[in-house]
Amino acid sequence: MHLVSRGSSTRVPASPTLGRRGFVQLLGAAGAVSLAGCAGPGSDDPGRQSTAASLDADASGDVIFSHWRAEDQSVFDELLARFAETYPDVELTQDIAPSADYQASALQRLRNGDSGDAFSTFRGAQFNAFAEAGVYSDLGDLDLVGSYPDELATIGQSDGKQLAVPYQVVFLDPVVNLDLLEKAGVSEIPTDWDGYLAMLDALRGTGAVPFGWPGGDTGNLGQLVNTMVMNNAPAEDMFTQVGAGELKLTDDWFVTTLRQYAELAPYMQEGVRGTLHDSLLQQFAQGEVAIIASGSYAIAPSRAAGAEFPMDLAPPVTVAAGEARYVGVHNATFLLGVNAASENQEAAVAWVDFLSQPENAAVYANSTAQHVGVEGVTYENADLKRLERWLTADTLLAPRFQLLDLDVQAAVDQSTVAVVGGTSPEQAAEEAQAIVDQQIG
Amino acid sequence: MSSTRGPARRRWPGLRRDAPYLWFVLPAVVLYGYFFALPVLQAFQYALTDWDGVSPDYDMVGLDNLTRAVSDDSLFTNALTNNLTFLLTVVVVQTLVSLLLAVLLVRNSRSSTFLRALYFVPAILSSVSVAFIWSFIYEPGDGLLNQAWSAIGLDGMRSSYLGEPGMAIVYVGLVQAWAHIGQLMIIFIAGLQQIPGELYEAADLDGAGRWGRFRHVTWPLIAPATAIVVSYTTIQSFKAFDLILGMSGNPPSRSLDILSTRLYTTYSDSELGYAAAQSILFMVIIAAVTVLQRRALRLTRQEG
Amino acid sequence: MPGTPALARRAILGVYALIIVVPLLVVVLGAFKSRRQLVDSPLGVPTSPTADNLTRVLSTQSMGDAFLNSVIVTGVAVLVSLFLSSLAAFGLARIRGRWGWVVFAFLVAGLAVPAQTAIVPQYVLWRQLGLLNSLTGLVIAEVVVTLPVAVFILTGFMRTLPPELFEAASIDGASPWRTYRSVVLPLSRPSLAAAAIFLFVITWNDLLYPLLFVSTPDKRTLPLVLLGFKGEFLTDYPVLFTGVLIASAPLVVIYVFLQRYFVAGLTAGSSR
């Protein structure tokens, strides 16, 4: 085997000095060029239309629907086919970006009108950033807005304008295996903290891991904090206040929350800080884990992985009996909006309108096994039916998404991981607050 | 001919002679200058602003971004620490293992050739692929590694790997090493094969054992190859962006955050001015580490 | 060699072979298993091999487009980068003046500068030029990022060519271009091949630029599509592994046939 040309391997020791000195010279020499020659930061504004076009039955042309829900691709394909029957002249394509990247790049792209005439956004940080950047057109005058109940519709409002509609609704509450719960002799999910811990003790008796938490999965580990703070925090907008410096993570309510994480830790699975959600799902589906602390979005894939037992939500209520303000947490996973820079708003509006029809939303809901924000949908899926009562229960809109800065959000998440790993709640809280201070400082 | 070689001509030997060849260099220089060098320089300009990447206007903030990263951002410091731990792990493991394998496979034989080819395979996979493979292996619940420990009765070795705050970055370092050891082994083999056999014969005559042969013949002569391996590894370790993103997402968990992912998170948070400042520090840090390493290697060579 | 060291040698080589083979085997076998089978026996031969993952990957993830885009971007970028860098390397090998050194330093300085340094201004530049979300834009990015390595490898090689060669050509009255075309290029074939492979691997596997510059699905390359396999909430390993297989297949095939250039190329590229 001829391994390497002698020329290149013997030459190398000489070259690094070349590179280094050359580099320094390059920097010096070209500094002037840069200041003279470049436009610098700032951006040009493409044309945009701030109020959405009205619904037009004769919409036509190419339109792109951009989202990050790789798992929903096939159902959207199905809906696309139905859409094509109503709007034969519209050529609609899905654009699915990797979710890890959607936040980072979608804004830039949408602003340029590069992609996404209709598009999805996360609520919270992304929605606010998009709203501020003027990416959305106002849907306020369109009939489709009426398909969403008022309390959900507020999620898509900014400055009094309806910029987006909350399409998918999930419950970011732990999900329990009801067979195991019955086996443990617990007939009802407790609504106070002592009762919750007692339930976990009882579940341990079944041989299953009582409380599974995907502590190694940065995309999923943070869901639990929603329910953990819902009754502890002094205000509904606790995390907004944390982001504004008005509340601190070192305050009692958050330290108490962390202390309760520490109480949950003994009920969690081995290696919890490295566990990925997918792996936990498999164990949950096999009945090896009684509770999976992520959200209702775990139900459908558990079924796919072979789970046949009935399931329900088991939100931890962290206060004493009778003191709970909320029984659980809901969230709009994504919002639908129409791009102000779109060149084909008619078709984009037609698509969002189409999705907002109860019969089409039902297709989406039943096929993804997720609830939707659209009213009047008939749920056929058994799991959706069982959970339907939660749609009208006293649940809080998931507060974690009030954390607008990725680093602040990660600071909160990581403090819970640290506590589960044995760090004292006080110390973890201080470390997290230190990062918050840096970021907002 | 001899009349043209005055002293002045020697200092600037014939522009006329070189001119035609400068045309050959021009396309690369123009393209590279416009699309890479210029943006790098612009990064310096961006670094002085608080531009968010969206607004039409921005403020000049001077050196605030730099001071913030250096003195007031524990996340940046954390990423730097992780990156250095990562670097150290990768350099040590990758260099030692690839050298060991090279020594064992230096002779050309059918089985050596086959094994070299086999060990090389991970180097052609994309980092995203490697990240997926090892996420599965490291998963604590049903991952391959913990299953393997249990299967051979070593339950005590089970771990949560990427969930161990202090060790996580080391585990990722091992993955990085896994992917590149085969490639670096080849460089070592090339170096080893250039060592004249007589030197070993001489060492044998002096009664040197295996270790003596290695210590007194192989090691001093392999130094150039070592320098290559270490400097390549260093740059690779700073570029491990794809690997971390594939294993942990954006932003990665704190224990896996390195400089390149930190930069990307800052960019994702729409702090483009600050991201540019971080990228400049990033560049300076790489340069500093490289210089230090060269110094250190030169020292060991002088000792040898 | 006497017994124990030889045995130790075999043991070490054998164990390391396992360390390489086992993870690869998990991927290859896993691509044909259900998630459950993968967990129950990650190394077992699939009992009831399934093509489900393959069908899912091929049908749902615009894998075909991505594959084609990867081929186009990689092919064009490698050719352009090779052409420009071989021109430059030839020029640099012939230039005797100080500026030759300056230009060389300028071009290879890029090796020490992480690509991330330039991404923010690059993004703005690409946008101004309308190069975002286009294969042309990707090709330019990849050419620019691979130029320094290519120049480094090829200049290193061309400087080892004996000067008499060029002098003979110019005495024969050949123009520099002719010398480049008919003397230098044919002689450089092995190092061109090695450099080509190195560039090929870098470009084919690159994630950064597609991540930043590409938005619509019809312009995506394989690593980006692969990253997208990790859904927001769900990760399906058998499907991921199938994606890994498809994305890696071309490189593995080329590796099997052109192993020598591969090894030489990746080694030369890392010798910087």
Image: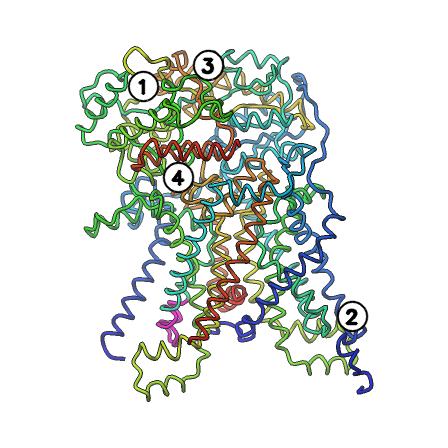
Tag 3 or tag 1, which sits nearer the N-term?
1
Tell me if residue B107 is in the magenta stretch. yes
Tell whether B48 sits left or right of A226: right
Tell me if residue A319 is in the magenta stretch. no
Q: Chain of mark 4?
A: C
Q: Chain of mark 3?
A: A
Per the model, the C-alpha gap separating discs 4 and 2 is 58 Å
The secondary structure that dominates the magenta segment is: helix
Mark 1: which amino acid? Val
Location of residue A317 in the rendering, given as x and y in whole percent from the top left corner = 31, 19
Circle 1 Cα neighbour tier, 10 Å, few/some/many (<14 / 14–19 / ≥20): many
Q: Secondary structure at mark 4?
A: loop
Q: Give the mark toward the camera: 1 or 2.
A: 1
Location of residue B68 in the rendering, given as x and y in whole percent from the top left corner = 55, 41
Residue to which mark 4 is pinned: C236
Residue to which mark 1 is pinned: A317
Residue to which mark 3 is pinned: A377
Q: Are marks 2 and 3 in contact (CB under 8 Å)?
A: no
Disc marking residue B130: none
Q: Using the rendered view, name the quadrant where residue B189 is placed.
A: bottom left
Circle 3 Cα neighbour tier, 10 Å, few/some/many (<14 / 14–19 / ≥20): some
- Of residues C13 and C256, the one nearer the viewer is C13
Q: Give the mark toward the camera: 1 or 3.
A: 1
Residue segment shown in magenta = B101-116
The quarter of the rendered structure image containing the N terminus of chain B is: bottom right
Q: Chain of mark 2?
A: B
Q: Secondary structure at mark 3?
A: loop
Mark 3: which amino acid? Val
Circle 2 Cα neighbour tier, 10 Å, few/some/many (<14 / 14–19 / ≥20): some
Residue to which mark 2 is pinned: B20
